[in-house]
Amino acid sequence: MKKYLFFLFILTFLTSACGFREDKQTVQDTATGYMVIDDSGRQVYLRNKPVRIVSTTYGTDEILIELVDAKNIKALSRWAGDPEITFISKEQAAAVGKTVYPSAESILALKPDIVFVSITSGKEVAKTLEDMGVTVYIADSPKNYDAMKKKVIGIASAVGERKKGEAMIGEMDAKLAALNEKLKLITPEKEKKVMAFSFIGAIGRKGNLLDDIFRHAYVRNCAAEAGLEQESGPLSKEQIVAVNPDVILLPTWDFNSDTSTSDFAKELLHDPAIKDIAAIKNNKVAFVSDRYRYVASQHITDSIEAVAKAVYPELF
């Protein structure tokens, strides 16, 4: 009995200590192909490595374009090629040649082997497609760096490119380590207080991805400190003044005809209610692309770097 318990202890130790944990993301071979678990916990079965792939989110676009040949991607999301919200270049979008809105009809016309949809908005489409016999992988909107790595390895496993996914994670970790070398000189008491804004107000709720990006960039998330949490309402001007951010980050993406980043910036920065906060008085205001603020892929390390550069330009 003692020998058995000792063996069990050693086995548990080894499986938990060796490299990236596979747990739910393990590829399981079956008699007719292989199975992976998507980010919603569903079992996804594939007979063969997919060669007709459709992506309906900019995050899965960015991961897939570095995992598979562009000719095997039959469509990217509608955002592909927009430099303010995605890392997919116009050249990459042109190489694929088609973008798609996440509707069952338009996706079915592409005869996909697998379709990647969003966990936040794609479940209804996923059900419709699966009822029609299409294989669907539901991808997460991660809230931290480690969850983003799981997303990458899950998608890589689904398209039969797990080793490339592991290499991508290695590159992410290496870049983050290099950033840490630059930023570790910033002690907690020297960390700048930063507040990011969208058109609807301060963003960066406690526990979401931007909050984690700020942590890795060695900055204090003013929105969370002021009380912006997952279920709370928007911050008041009084809360913004009370937390007194050192730096303000503004949006760059005019996502529809009713919005203008320049008009929004003028309105915010000339608001008499917040004119005395440190960021405005000291002109510490930066425009940071929304592709960094709403990142959903391996480019999270680029987002961390972009925030750090905006706040601590002297270190770069």
Image: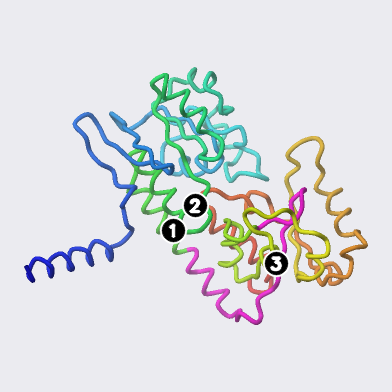
- Taking depth in this image into account, of 205 and 25 the one nearest to the observer is 205
Q: Which residues are magenta?
A: 175-204
- Taking depth in this image into account, of 302 and 276 the one nearest to the observer is 276
In the rendered view, would you say 262 is above or below 146? above
Q: Which residue is mark 2?
A: 298
Identity of the residue furthest to the right in this view: 272
Name the mark on residue 222: 3
Pointers 2 and 1 in contact (C-beta within 8 Å): yes
Percent across and percent down for residue 213 are: 58, 61
**Three-letter code, disc 1:** Glu
Camera-nearest label, 2 or 3: 3
Q: Earlier in the sequence, mark 2 or mark 3?
A: 3
Q: How many C-alpha atoms fall within 10 Å of the one at disc 1: few (<14), some, or many (≥20)? A: some
Q: Earlier in the sequence, mark 2 or mark 1?
A: 1
Residue 185 counted in the magenta span: yes
Percent across and percent down for residue 117 are: 50, 35
Q: Could you tell me which secondary element the residue under label 3 belongs to?
A: helix
**Three-letter code, disc 3:** Cys
Camera-nearest label, 2 or 1: 2
Q: Could you tell me which secondary element the residue under label 1 belongs to?
A: helix
Q: Which residue is mark 1?
A: 171
